[in-house]
Image: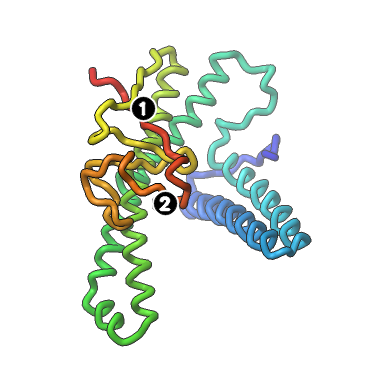
Amino acid sequence: MISQHPKTMDLSNFTTLQNLEAAFGGESMANRKYLFFAEVANRLGYKDLAKLFKETAEQETAHAFAHFVLLHPELLVKDPDALTEEQKRAIVSRCLSLAIEGETYEYTTMYPEFATAAQRDRDNPAAEEFLKQAQESNEHANTFRQAAHRFGLLKFIENYHADRYAEALEVLNGGQTVTRIAGEDPKTRKWVCRQCSMIYDPVAGDPDSGIAPGTPFEEIPEDWKCPICGATKKTFKPLEEKLAA
């Protein structure tokens, strides 16, 4: 639960601001790690440990929310009934703006840079030498290759997320709902994973999974799986894109 009475902090102190952002990031990461640990423990039959991980994850979420409210006090909602519709829209608009900012950073900067670094690491002569000497280096090279592929795919996913947030913000501010339709040509019609939003583009294919460029989604083998989340082919649906102006 978000604290309803956060202490006022002087965020003009750059070090304190950085520490607060780092604390929020750390608590958020801890939450996701512990939920993952809970799933592992549960699958292995350690129900009590799974429960412990889940309870701790919830506590880490509370810590993260408390930090985030200090970073963005404008989002604190103490009494929803006391707010006008305009004030409510302003708060939600701010949430969408922050979401757009984050997703845009991920697809324009973060993942492209990660992909470049992964590709560079994979092609490093030293890594190639290690590959010849030990199986461990082979595993590293495969990891770098997978990372480069995944980061490249995630760039488009975050672009998709940012675009949908921007549309929602436009509608919230009185704009028109954007008309979207799925393409009719199988050679160019894109498909999106309903589980993680990975977008399959037939023009690019999925070479790392053995799917050559130019392969329509309908021609992909039925045992193909989403390279991001592992969902089956049946999990995908035609991607509805904006109509050209």
Report the side of 24 relative to 102 (left or right): right
Q: How far from the left and from the top, in percent, is residue 145?
A: 32, 64
Circle 2 packing at 10 Å, graded few (<14), some (14-19), many (20+), is: few
Q: Quadrant of residue 217?
A: top left
Q: Residue at x 31, y 35 (%)?
A: 190
Q: Which mark is residue 240?
A: 1
Q: Residue at x 76, y 60 (%)?
A: 47
Marks 1 & 2, CB-CB < 8 Å contact: no
**Disc 2 marks which residue?**
223
Secondary structure of the residue carrying tag 2 is loop
Return the residue found at the far bottom: 133
Q: Quadrant of residue 233?
A: top left
Q: Residue at x 31, y 48 (%)?
A: 109
Position of 240 relative to 111 (above/below):
above
Q: Amino acid at mark 2?
A: Asp
Q: How far from the left and from the top, in percent, is residue 59?
A: 70, 51
Closer to us: 165 or 232? 232
Closer to us: 165 or 237? 237
Choose mark 1 or mark 2, whichever is in front. Answer: 2
Color scheme of the displayed model:
rainbow
Report the Cα–Cα distance between label 1 and label 2: 24 Å
Closer to us: 145 or 238? 238
Circle 1 packing at 10 Å, graded few (<14), some (14-19), many (20+), is: some
Q: How far from the left and from the top, in percent, is residue 24?
A: 56, 50
Report the side of 195 relative to 213 (left or right): right
Q: How far from the left and from the top, in percent, is residue 6?
A: 66, 39
Report the side of 54 relative to 241 (left or right): right
Which quadrant, please, contains the N terminus?
A: top right
Return the residue found at the far right: 48
Secondary structure of the residue carrying tag 1 is strand
